[in-house]
């Protein structure tokens, strides 16, 4: 990680910010007359990235640049009714210096016929659940198919539980006249 980490962190920033904002920030950084023929430090790059991105990147830099380790993801996808998939994302850390790595995550869903549908979820807490639309019944799941994230030993599985509306929602009393409970 130590030698390749710098390049991967830049790739992660590009993925997080998007190509347009990322490359504009780099152009601004390289054209900054205050940095020309002088020393530049990480905070100088961060300031240029934040100026274009319009949001703080402090959490990102604290997690991925200044502290140690990497996340280990466990992804579970489950067909969830017609045209939807429920994705649960869990994370453990390889080092205690970071309590949680926040990052958008790319997940590829696959059909029996080989069709693919990529979704990006904004992972901000452990055991986070996402319900996303998908144009087919999912038969496979792949985590980070384009290798945007520093991580290791990840597991992505398709749950075989089927979604049953009758087991999930109960309506009572039935019949009713004045009051209806939905749970």
Image (cartoon, grey):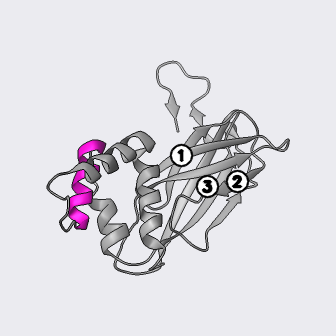
Q: Mark 3 packing: few (<14 Cα in 10 Å), some, or many (20+)?
A: few
Q: Residue at x 59, y 65 (%)?
A: 74
Q: Mark 2 packing: few (<14 Cα in 10 Å), some, or many (20+)?
A: many
The answer to whether any part of residue 28 appears in the image is: yes
- The first of marks 1 and 2 along the sequence is 1
Q: Image height check: is 168 above or below 159?
A: above
Circle 2 is placed at which residue position? 141
Alpha carbon of mark 3 to alpha carbon of mark 1: how far?
12 Å
The one of 57 and 179 positioned closer to us in this rendering = 57
The answer to whether any part of residue 169 appears in the image is: no
Where is residue 51, by image quadrant?
A: top left
In the image, residue 142 lies in the stretch drawn in magenta: no
Question: Is there a contact, CB below 8 Å, between mark 1 and mark 2?
Answer: no
Where is residue 44, by image quadrant?
A: bottom left
SS type, badge 2: strand
In the image, residue 51 lies in the stretch drawn in magenta: yes
Q: Image height check: is 152 above or below 178?
A: below
Circle 3 is placed at which residue position? 146
SS type, badge 1: strand
SS type, badge 3: loop
Of helix, strand and loop, which mostly describes the magenta segment? helix
Circle 1 is placed at which residue position? 120
């Amino acid at each position: 990680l130590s030698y390749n980490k710098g390049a991967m962190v830049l790739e992660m920033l590009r993925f997080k910010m998007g190509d347009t904002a990322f490359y504009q920030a780099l152009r601004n950084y390289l054209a900054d007359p205050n940095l020309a023929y002088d020393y530049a430090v990480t905070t100088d790059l961060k300031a240029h990235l934040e100026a274009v991105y319009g949001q703080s990147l402090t959490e990102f830099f604290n997690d991925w640049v200044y502290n140690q380790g990497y996340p280990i993801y466990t992804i579970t996808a489950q067909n969830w009714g017609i045209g939807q998939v429920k994705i649960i994302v869990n994370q453990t850390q390889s080092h205690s210096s970071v309590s949680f790595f926040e990052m958008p995550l790319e997940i590829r869903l696959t059909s029996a016929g080989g069709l693919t549908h990529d979704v990006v979820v904004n992972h901000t807490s452990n055991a986070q659940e996402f319900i996303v639309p998908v144009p087919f019944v999912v038969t496979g799941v792949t985590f980070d198919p384009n290798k945007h994230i520093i991580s290791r030993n990840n597991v992505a599985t398709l749950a075989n539980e089927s979604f049953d509306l009758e087991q999930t929602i109960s309506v009572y009393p039935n019949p009713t006249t004045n009051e209806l409970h939905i749970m």
